[in-house]
Image (spheres, grey):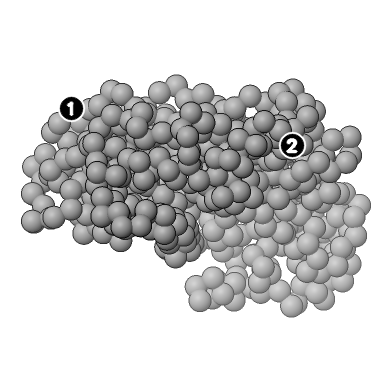
Amino acid sequence: MNVPDDLKFAETHEWIRVDGDVGTVGITDHAQAELTDIVFAETPKVGSKVSAKEALAVVESVKAASDIYSPVGGDVVEANEALADNPALINQDPYGAGWIFKIRIADSSELNSLLDAAAYRAQTEK
Amino acid sequence: MVEFAGWEMPVQYGGILEEHKAVRENCGIFDISHMGEFLICGRAAASFLDSLLTNSVTKLEGGQAQYSLLLNHHSGIIDDLIVYRMGAHEFVLIVNAAKIDEDFTWLRNHIPDGADEVALTNLSDAYAAMAIQGPRAPEVFSKAFSFPWEQRRNRIAQFDNQPARGGHPAPGGTLRSFVATTGYTGELGFEVLVPADEASRFWDSFVAAGAKPCGLGARDTLRLEMCYPLNGSDLSGSHTPLEAGLGAFVDFEKEHFTGRDALLQQKQRGITRKLAAIRVQEKSPPIRAHYAILVNGEKVGETTSGALSPTLGCGIALGYLPFPLAKIGQDLEVEVRGRLYRALVVKKPFYKPRS
């Protein structure tokens, strides 16, 4: 299971890659493997304000719809438009082309409560 | 794995889309051992079944299968099932897993008093069942069996329990095995009933012959593309065969079957709602059961089953609509998380298999 060391993780299986005050968010390799074929992704509206742990996107496999929670609070600054035509990018490249949204992080101290790669790996192996 | 009617069942082995495609283009195998099997024998077996089922078993010759419905006294659907006629006085019923006890009790309680001419046996635990489905199912069949493929659909035959060429004979099995050209996917294919302890040997021989293991997830999307109803979702004790669009499986020429009077009254009065096939006309999330169906912003019903059709690439659903709206070409909307998606009532099935 691929768990990149440079990312932070939420217990709900989202990852965030921080670049300055903007974080890119997606779901983990473990999550996409559990969900299997993702056939629809509903990305958040650019400009929407969210709190940490708030549901703001949905990914759907053939059998189930799953909420995606923001790991941190802030303003959504970009959504991955490519997922509208090709939601399977989340399966194929969960940490790259399958990113879901970018958020301007309101309070960077919230990052401290997220898991690092080792802790997330431990959670998925439980 | 999920629990389904008390069974641990795989939703998928690899991925639902891949499994679905295998059945439409090649060949897949489903473990359907959860389904129930009843054996009904005796000189009065045919008349007994005709007194309870909507279709007419007297129309069947030995070796033929028929889809039929078991109704309550109000003409609501208890179960939908397949009847196989093995001979003049012998029938096998395949019933839904969740309904085994209810169906069996219903049948047993309706055996006429003092009739030792009907013997009813529940063999659900004794049999394992598998469905091998897809355009290449005949090839899989030919590799696994030494007797010829039956070209006609809805036929059943017994076989001697020695499936694989080079396989070992079954050690003294007393249950007979059956193979039938039936299924729940719309594709060419066959289903086998074998003694439970023989199941893995048969499974392995079909997989070795080229059938791809498929789970409940693909079984559901495949049957939905065909508009085959699922009892408990699209059918229930408060829906009648006429409302469900299954009138072709009701033989009103029979003088009696349970539910006939109420159903005939409904036929004469006219139905007020009907199960419609609904196809979404724009890019949408997968449609699921219990989504609202609207016309001009007003809720007129809800979906009973739905999916993102893997073959067609669009949202499809079944749902009961007021009768005047259940006509082909009717404009609708389906609501998903507060957003409305344009949809149409379309002709059944959504998809016509090539095989």
Check the image and name the residue furthest to the front: B114
- Kind of residue sitting beneath label 2: Thr
The answer to whether residue A115 is left or right of residue A126 is: right
Can residue A104 be seen here? The reply is: yes
Q: Element at badge 1? A: loop
The relative height of residue B102 versus residue B348 in the rendered view (above or below) is: below
Q: Which residue is drawn at 82% across and 76% down?
A: A109
Mark 2 or 1 closer to N-term?
1
Q: Residue B341 in the image: state x and y as whole percent.
A: 79, 37
Which chain letter goes with mark 1?
B
Can you identify the residue that label 2 sits on?
B272
Mark number displayed over residue B344: none
Q: Residue A82 in the image: state x and y as whole percent.
A: 72, 39
Can residue B97 be seen here? The reply is: no
The relative height of residue B160 versus residue A24 in the rendered view (above or below) is: above
Q: Element at badge 2? A: loop
Q: Which residue is drawn at 34% across and 32% down?
A: B58
Q: Residue at x 18, y 27 (%)?
A: B148
**Marks 2, 1: nearer the viewer:** 2
Can you identify the residue that label 1 sits on?
B148
Which chain letter goes with mark 2?
B
- Label 1 environment density (alpha carbons within 10 Å; few <14, some 14–19, many ≥20): few
Q: Residue B79 in the image: state x and y as whole percent.
A: 49, 49
Nearer to me, A7 or B347: B347
Q: In which quarter of the image is residue B43?
A: top left
The answer to whether residue B54 is left or right of residue B282 is: left
Q: Which residue is drawn at 87% across and 63% down?
A: A50
> Do tags 2 and 1 sit on the same chain?
yes
What's the CA distance linking mark 2 and mark 1?
Answer: 48 Å
- Kind of residue sitting beneath label 1: Pro
